[in-house]
Amino acid sequence: MRHRFARPTPSFAISAIALFVALGGTSYAVATGSIDSREIKNNSVRGTDIKNGTIKQGDISDTTEAALKGQTGPQGPKGLQGAQGPRGIVTPQYGRGGFVNLTAGLVLGNVIVTKTVPAGTYVVHAKTNLFSDLAGRNIACNLNNGNTVVDTISWDSTILNHNSPVSLLAATVVTTGPLQVRCFPNGPDATSGGTASNTKLVAIPVG
């Protein structure tokens, strides 16, 4: 006995094709991962549906990122002290004195140059030209830090019209200062004591 199948009607064929396309399109979307937001129901995606590491900072809105920011933690321990930096530029302090007639008998001497400097440690160098028109005259000059003598030089004039440069040098800590060179003439003339000229003083900070 033969079974005869009914020939499909046009409406059946159209329905079958539509079902095939619908099923096939869904399969294609699943296979290629081309699902977009129109095909996802709002509030239906859960955290377990998202692969770890796939969401980056740029995928999160600024508002959400701000809400995720935690509180500031406690201050960490103090780090180790760094290496000492290079020494800054050293600016020497200069003082100059002109032509000074030296007078004998002054208790504090004749100040031939003075320089006020900021507090600190200095290497101080001073020089001057001493002159005596008499033989046998002695001129002592002191380098003073305030009222403290930090160096001294003594010069003797052995001939008439004797001229000689002398210098003083000291390392000293200045608190209030000033730095000065004071000269004390002694000799056959009780009042006149020669001259000092072209006096220069330089104080170089060292600490």
Image: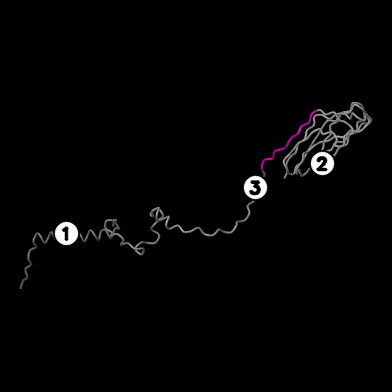
Residue type at mark 1 is Ala
Q: Secondary structure at mark 2?
A: loop
Residue 93 magenta-drawn?
yes
Residue 26 in picture, x, y percent from top left: 24, 60
The tally of labels here is 3
Residue 24 magenta-drawn?
no
Quadrant in the picture for residue 24: bottom left
Q: With respect to residue 29, does 129 lie above or below?
A: above
Residues packed near mark 2 inside 10 Å, few (<14), some (14 to 19) or many (20 plus): few
Q: Going by the image, does 103 lie left or right of 64?
A: right
Q: Going by the image, does 61 lie left or right of 124?
A: left
Q: With respect to residue 117, does 190 lie above or below?
A: above
Residue type at mark 3 is Gly
- Check disc 3 and report the residue beneath it: 85
Quadrant in the picture for residue 43: bottom left
Mark 3–mark 2 CB contact (< 8 Å): no
* Of residues 11 and 63, the one drawn nearer to the viewer in this rendering: 63
Q: With respect to residue 146, does 165 lie above or below?
A: above
- Rounded to the nearest angstrom, the CA distance separating label 1 from label 2 is 115 Å
Give the mark toward the camera: 3 or 1.
Answer: 3
Residue 176 in picture, x, y percent from top left: 75, 42
Q: Secondary structure at mark 1?
A: helix
Residue at screen point 7% across, 70% down: 3
Residues packed near mark 1 inside 10 Å, few (<14), some (14 to 19) or many (20 plus): few
Label ID, residue 125: none
Residue 206 in picture, x, y percent from top left: 73, 43
- Check disc 1 and report the residue beneath it: 18
Segment tinted magenta in the rendering: 88-98
- Closer to the chain start, of discs 3 and 1, is 1
- Check disc 2 and report the residue beneath it: 147
